[in-house]
Image (spheres, grey):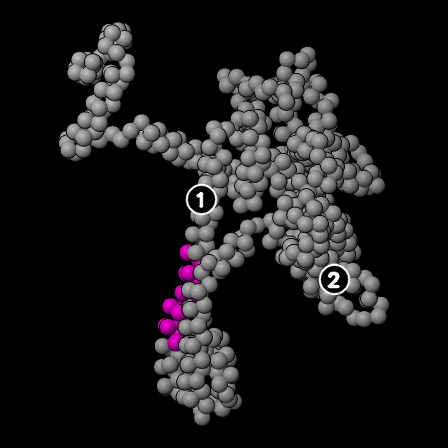
Amino acid sequence: MTEHAHPPKTSLLGLVYQWLFDPEFKHGFNHTVERCIAFLIVASVFAVLIENTPEIYNSYAGWFHWFDVLTVGIFTVEYVMRVATAHLHPDFAGKSMPRLRYAFSFYALVDLIAIAPFYFARFVDVDVEMLRVLRIMRLARMFKLSRQIIPAWLEFQELNQGRSFRAKVFALLEPTGHSGRLHAYLDNFIVFWVALSIFCVIFESVASMRALFAVEFHVIDVMAFTLFTIEYIARVYSAPENPKYHNRMARWAHIRSGPAIIDLLAILPFVLESLLSQHLDLRFLRVFRLVRMLKLTRYTSALETLYKVVQREWQVIFASVFVMMLLVVLTASLGFLLEHEAQPDKFENIPQSIYWAIITLASVGYGDISPITPMGRALTVVLALVGIGIFAIPAGLLASAFTDQLRIDRDAFKQRLMLAFEDGMLNGAERELIIAEAERLHLSHEEVTRLTHEARAEFAAKEAEDHTHANGLVLDAKAHPALAAAQFKLLVDQLSLIAQATGEDSLRKSLAHIKTDHQAELDVLAIVAKRHI
């Protein structure tokens, strides 16, 4: 890796590069700029695709135009500033004509191609066909994402050098500590396709939207199915690399796991609909494509944390649920008793009254079933007030336990850091384990840094405390005079043994050569030596 050189702060271009484009400057906005540019790239590509639908484009042509002007303007400013600060970039600093060299580099050419069609159409007379071609060429803006993807790919290759292909596939799909940024980009890509496919399934149920985007919905569904199938096969193939599976049936163990079943259910409706649609009406399977939403549980630890909370607090939760069910049955029985004669069609039996009791306790009721007798209405008022407290108990328990579990996970991560610091430094295996654990808990870089500093501080304090205890107990003589006298006597006895073992001449010579301001200690040593020699 090229050694990074920070630009001088006195230069305006140096400040621009440092604050906007320098990834090594921790106070800068490089990561924010990269994220915003990536978002604009994706949004502009979607805008180009939607422009091909006349029913939408004709109604909002002005909005599309000004959005294109805004994105091209931002991309142009970015391109100009990158060229202007090219001489400060580590790859071009110190070379002749650094700006010209950068202008012909791969990333600069991609940035130029992303904005060239817009300016070409503005300053050159083109026919309708050429204008359509230029609009399609705007899709080349996707290549701007290579500024993040290519360095991540190179980093991934460096981190996994010497590992097998299967190990690389596993590192690409799961956080291992040597997955790098490419794993995060792949996760975001899969999450994007999950969200897009869910979005399409929802809006496909709208007749007007289905009439406009029937082809687009089908293409997106095919692409999502292809991507999820490749992901499923890759996860099954790389399952033996997972440390959770130590037996020979690692792939079968993975197939039976919960996340793998969800991955299979995400692609199964498409397969069944494609194979059996000629013989059976399987349109209802389209709704089951929403199972893909469960794939998002792989990319968040929220459900895992919730499972730990329920497992830890199940007795308290069960007690609160039991109280609620008891109150519901009792309320339904009283409602049936008070309202059956007045409304035999609505309070026909106790099971039907249970519906009224639940919606009254959980909310203010839907109005479809409501008491009309004075006693029934009085009971409803009491239930509405009691329900506020009763139904809030489980929510409060889960909220507090959920927060407590997050704290426990972070404390466990900090404890793992302290264990890693015991030998004074982190080796490669410990570093990979910590990185993988941070990715599993979805901790941000700032949180990991903060927890690392806290772990180091606690470890240093623990070392200092252990060192103090090892050197002996230090007492406050004024607060504990008896204990201090006993300790002093013990030290005098130890000095006596030293004096007997050393001899008078050698001890006097050693005391004479000591240079210190603590003359009282030397006098004590001399007295002890005279008494015991």
As drawn, is 465 to the left or to the right of 129?
left
Residue 49 position within the rendered picture, expressed as x and y whole percent measured from the top left:
73, 47
Residue 29 position within the rendered picture, expressed as x and y whole percent measured from the top left:
54, 31
The kind of secondary structure element at disc 2 is helix
Q: Which mark is residue 312?
A: none
Which quarter shows the N terminus? top right
What stretch of residues is rendered in magenta? 383-400
Q: Nearer the viewer, residue 185 or 7?
A: 185
Residue 191 position within the rendered picture, expressed as x and y whole percent measured from the top left:
64, 49
Q: Residue at x 62, y 29 (%)?
A: 77
Residue 376 position within the rendered picture, expressed as x and y whole percent measured from the top left:
39, 84
User: Relative to residue 122, is residue 103 depicted above or below?
Assistant: above
Give the distance between the C-alpha atoms of the residues marked 1 and 2, in whole angstroms. Answer: 42 Å
The kind of secondary structure element at disc 1 is helix
Please check the rendered image and state whether residue 486 is part of the magenta-colored stretch, yes or no.
Answer: no
- Report the residue marked by disc 2: 269
Dot 2 crowding, Cα within 10 Å, few <14, some 14–19, many 20+: many
Which quarter shows the C terminus? top left
- Report the residue marked by disc 1: 411
Amino acid type shown at disc 2: Pro
Q: Give the quadrant of residue 466.
A: top left
Which numbered disc, 1 or 2, marks the residue closer to the eye? 1
As drawn, is 45 to the left or to the right of 530?
right
